Amino acid sequence: MAAETFEIERLGSQGDGIAAHAQGPVFIPFTLPGETVMVAREKSKAMMLSLLDASPDRIAPVCRHFGPDGENGTCGGCALQHLERSAYDAFKRQVVVDALAAHGIDCPVAPLVTSGPGERRRASFAGRRTENGILLGFSSPESHHIVAIEECPVLSPTLFARLPALKLLAGILVSTSDPFRIAVMETETGLDISFAGIKAPSEKRRQAATRAVMSVRGIARLAIGEEIIVEPVKPELTLSGTRVFPPPASFAQATLGAEEAMTDIVVRHLKGSKRVADLFSGFGTFALRLAAKSRVHAVEFDGPALAALDQAVRNRQGLKQVTTERRDLFRRPLLPRELAPFDGVVFDPPRAGAKEQAEELARSDVARIVAVSCNPQTLGRDLAILRDGGYSIDTVVPVDQFFWSAHVEAVACLRRK
C-alpha cells in the first residue's frame, strides 16, 4: 500500500477521523479534526503512518496499549484517549444529536452525563491458549489478534487486580487452542466470572478450578455459561436498598454512576405514575426503584433474570406490587390493549432497539414513556416512530459509561400530546 497524505475533516460516530477522497470518505483511526496525516490506505480504511500536523485537542494517551503503536498491538477497548476532555464530551453528545437528526428529530439534548477512569465494573476479556500459556486481554479492532493487557485505566482497580486469577482459572479450564471469552462483573461480594466458548471441562479440571477459586480472595462465583462451577458466596448488587442476586452472565450497567444517573431520570419522569410497565427489565435495574412509588409489571425474556427480580421483591418490604412476565418483546410486543392499564412505560432494549414495541406504544394511550438505549441510531428510529404516533420528546440525555470508547447511552423522556 502506497503512502498518502490526508487532512482530517471530522470525527465519525465510531471515533475514527474522516478524510475526503474522490472515491468516498476514508476512515483513519486515532486521528482528530484539523490534523494532517500520512497513511497507508486500502479502500475506505487506512492506518496512520505519521502525524504531520497535530490538532490542539490532541493529548498524550494514558495507556501503553492505546493507538497504532500500542504495546503488544492496538487494543480495541478505547478509541479516544488522545482527545482532550472537553472536546471528548462534546463529541459524545454530538453522536446522539446526529443520530436523532438522521431521523428528523430536533429536540433538547442535555449535556453529557460523564464518567471517568477506573469506573468500569464489567468487562469481557478475549483469551486463547498458546504454546506460552494463556493469552488474555482485549481484541484489536476488526481483528482476531488479542492484545495482552499489562494495564487498563478504564477498569475498576479491583477488577483489574484479579487478572492473574482469571489467567489461572483459564489455564485450568481451557483445554484447546480455540478462542474463548470471560465475562467478569464486580459485585459487592466479589467478582462474578463466566467463561464462554470453552469445551466442557473434565471433573478433574472442575475440581481444580474449585480449589483455585477457594484459595483466591475476591471471587464470588465461577460459571461456564449459566452453569455454576463454584459459588463461595452469592454475587450481590444493591438497587435502591434492595438486595439482588443476579444469575450467571447476566446484564448490568457498566458503571454504577451511569446506572444511578439513568435511574434518576427514569424515576423523575415517571413520578406520579400509578402503574408502570418496565419492558426489557432484566433483573430490575429500573423496576426495583420505580416500585418504591408505583406498581410495576416487569417484562423480560431472560427467565433467570426475572427469577432474580422476583426473589429480590420477596425479600424486601415496603415496595409496591411488582409482577413479572417472561416474554419475547421482539416477537410478541405488548399490544395497545395490554398497555391500557399503564400510565407509564420504560423500555431498555438491546442494541437492536425496540422497533416492534415502539410501534405498539405509538398506538397506545400511555401518558409518559422513557426510552433507554445503548445505540443512538436505533434510538433515533424508535423515537421517530413514537413521535409520528403523537408523542412529544421532552429531552434526551446522553450518558457516557464506556469511557474513551465511541459508545454512548441515551435516555429519552416522552409524553403523549
Image (cartoon, grey):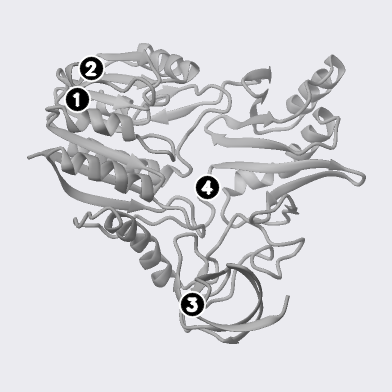
What residue type is disc 2 on?
A: Lys
Q: Secondary structure at mark 4?
A: loop
Mark 4 or mark 3: whose residue is earlier in sequence: 3
Residue 40 lies in what quarter of the image? bottom right
Which numbered disc covers residue 20?
3
For marks 4 and 1, give the CA distance: 30 Å
Q: CA distance from mark 4 to mark 3?
A: 35 Å
- Dot 4 and dot 2 residues touching (CB under 8 Å): no
> Residue at point 82% right, 18% down?
207
Foreground residue among 148 and 351: 351
Distance (Cα) linking label 4 and label 2: 32 Å
Give how far apart the Cα atoms at labels 2 and 1 are: 7 Å
Which residue bears the numbered disc 1?
293
Residue 414 lies, in percent from the top left, at 18, 41
Distance from label 2 to label 3 (Cα)?
57 Å
- Residue of label 2: 320
State if disc 1 and disc 2 touch (CB < 8 Å).
yes
Label 1 CA crowd tier, 10 Å (few <14, some 14–19, many 20+): many
Q: Which residue is mark 4?
A: 120
Quick check: can you spot residue 261? no
